Image (cartoon, rainbow, N blue to C red):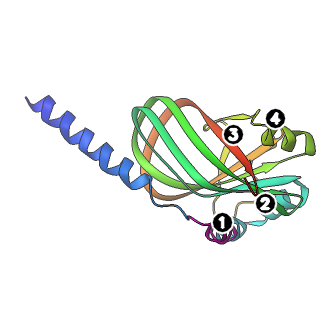
Amino acid sequence: MLNRQRLVLLLMLVLSLTSMAFAKEPATLEEKKAAANKTLQEFKAQGPIIQQYLDKAYGYVVFPVIGQGGFILGGGHGSGGMVYERGSLVGTASVTLVSIGAQIGGQKFRELIFIEDKATMERFKQGKIELDADASAVMAQAGTSTGANFTGGMAIFTKPVAGAMAKATVGTQIINFSPLGQ
């Protein structure tokens, strides 16, 4: 009986954290652009490494909020991504996270993906890139002077927003690109 009560309490905790992770995202394109700009400024405030990546990257994707949660099986989603190529907005993106392994909790975080060159950008736009959910992400922290390296033509930075999640998982990020006007 005691084990059953603990399991129920644990599941209630996971559900409450997971529901917190999937917060409302900006709805209009203008709201999404404003949220992406604010997010980019937050990343830049963490240290000079972000500007260094902006200077050398061919493009980048800004996700102002991605929510994820899980208990053994995990999932997440973010739909407010803005895609920039050579400094110009070229489209929007959504991301779906899927993972399996030891995990519990729910969280919201921001993500900034740098795209190294034109060839990688074209593969990204064609939906031919899936990212390891955690393998190449670097958590942006105040005073960061070193960070992710381009792996497979991409470098990923994340910044926690709210919640808590403990995990040792295997997973993927599936990103869908939509050109502006579609």
In the rendered view, tell whether residue 166 sits above or below residue 141: above
Question: Mark 2 sits on what residue?
Answer: 49
- Looking at the rendered image, the quarter that the N terminus falls into is top left
Q: CA distance from mark 3 to mark 1?
A: 29 Å
Q: Nearer the viewer, mark 4 or mark 3?
A: 4
Could you say whether the residue bearing mark 3 is in a helix, strand or loop?
Answer: loop
- Crowding around mark 1 (Cα neighbors within 10 Å: few <14, some 14 to 19, many 20+) is few
| Marked residue nearer the N-terminal end (3 or 1) | 1
| Marked residue nearer the N-terminal end (2 or 4) | 2
Spot occupied by residue 88 in the image (x, y as percentages of width and height) = 85, 63
Q: Nearer the viewer, mark 2 or mark 4?
A: 4
> Which kind of residue does numbered mark 3 sit on?
Ser
> Which kind of residue does numbered mark 1 sit on?
Leu
- The answer to whether the residue labelled 3 contacts the one labelled 1, judged by CB atoms less than 8 Å apart, is no
Question: Mark 3 sits on what residue?
Answer: 136
- The answer to whether the residue labelled 4 contacts the one labelled 3, judged by CB atoms less than 8 Å apart, is yes
